[in-house]
Amino acid sequence: MDLADIPLIDQHAHNLLKPEVAAQYPYSAAFTESYYPEIINYHARYTFFYRRSLREVAALLNCEAEETAILSRRQSLGLEELTNIYFRAANLEAIYLDDGLQAENILPISWHEKFIAVRRILRLELLAEQLIPQSPDFATFLDRFNSELDPPPHEVVAFKSIACYRSGLDIQPVAFEVAKADFDTLKEKSLTQKIRLTDKPLIDFLLQQALLIAAKYRLPVQLHTGYGDPDLNLRLANPLYLRHLLESPQYSCVPIVLLHASYPYMREAGYLASVYPQVYLDFGLAVPFLSVSGMRETIRQLLELTPTTKLMYASDAHSIPELYYLGAKWGRQLLGEVLSQAVIDSDITVPEAEIIATAILRDNALSLYQSNP
């Protein structure tokens, strides 16, 4: 199936880095989740993803498939022209940006809006980290946190939590006094150091506060699941840990979007989407970071059980514009291959495959986020 003409809704991505910041990183840093110099400067250049991507980028930029040639070509074009080239080649209709990744180093949403329609995803942990030093006590902090979310800012299409990174997905009820004690400890630390929220009771408490607000507006909440950088404990990134949240009646009307195909927990994520009405999935990060066969298998495993109304395209692009294009290229190609095989297997018909492709690449996201245009 050729899906090139279907415009994409990229329902989870990140802002590009400021050029002066990007210049401080090796090009290969954008092609790995590791932050260890030995991985970035050597091993990352020997992944299937990196080797494949050099050829694809070089073909688009009309230069040799070598990093030095690509860097020279990028320099001559400049970031704005590069972004134009990649966004056009990706055939993007809109992007939803989590602007909480390296917040001090990224270009603002307004810069991205020069090229494409953009909606904002509000990262909960970053908001909390910003408010803790400004708040004299927990009651004031909680009032400010809730008021920033309720009502959701008009440009916000979803909330997002990185609880998975900070303390894992086994989110449990937390008493007010327990959360307050964590706040008091962090508040004291904030007098002498920058705050990084890693305290599980406070993270769990604030996520559930946000879910109550999201329930009022039926606002989607995105959760990082599965694969990520070394800060993450992959064992605690399994979405099956979310059972308490998914079974809690007060959050049952909140659409929960499990990001990144929950890789390597694709089947677990697909199971959750198949039995819980509020669970949705995307396959960003797994596509385009895996090998071609790995990406194909990821999408195939997601669709073993996942209703096709529950799966969405995303790139998880960040830092450099190449990742938007690479995600789009392989997202379309491999979804097309998986759906073509499903036709051969007699799971679906050709007309059904065409409808499903458009739904996954575009329509499901528009439907899920339609109450927040």
Image: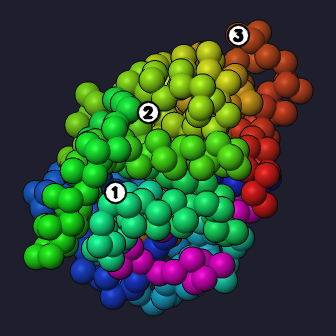
Residue indicated by mark 2: 262
Residue pictured at 24% horizontal, 80% vertical: 24
* Among the two numbered marks 2 and 1 on one chain, the one whose residue lies closer to the N terminus: 1
Magenta highlight range: 92-113
Rendered location of residue 78, percent (x, y): 48, 88
Camera-side residue: 119 or 331?
119
The three-letter amino acid code for the residue at tag 3 is: Asp
Residue pictured at 58% horizontal, 83% vertical: 111
Residue indicated by mark 1: 31
Which label belongs to residue 224?
none
Which of the image's four quarters has the C terminus? Answer: bottom right
**Side (left or right) of 217 relative to 22:** right
| Spatial separation of the CA atoms under disc 2 and disc 1 | 19 Å
**Would residue 14 be visible to someone looking at this image?**
no
Q: Is residue 284 above or below residue 134?
A: above
Residue pictured at 55% horizontal, 54% vertical: 159
Asked which quadrant contains residue 232, the reply is top left
Q: Is residue 266 magenta?
A: no
* Among the two numbered marks 1 and 3 on one chain, the one whose residue lies closer to the N terminus: 1
The three-letter amino acid code for the residue at tag 2 is: Ser
The three-letter amino acid code for the residue at tag 1 is: Phe
Q: Is residue 97 magenta?
A: yes
Camera-side residue: 337 or 264?
264
**Side (left or right) of 314 relative to 20:** right
Which of the image's four quarters has the N terminus? Answer: top right
How packed is label 3: few (under 14 Cα within 10 Å), some, or many (20 or more)?
Answer: few
Rendered location of residue 191, percent (x, y): 15, 76
Q: Nearer the viewer, mark 3 or mark 2?
A: 2
- Regarding mark 1 in the picture, which secondary structure is present there? helix
Camera-side residue: 219 or 20?
219
Residue indicated by mark 3: 345
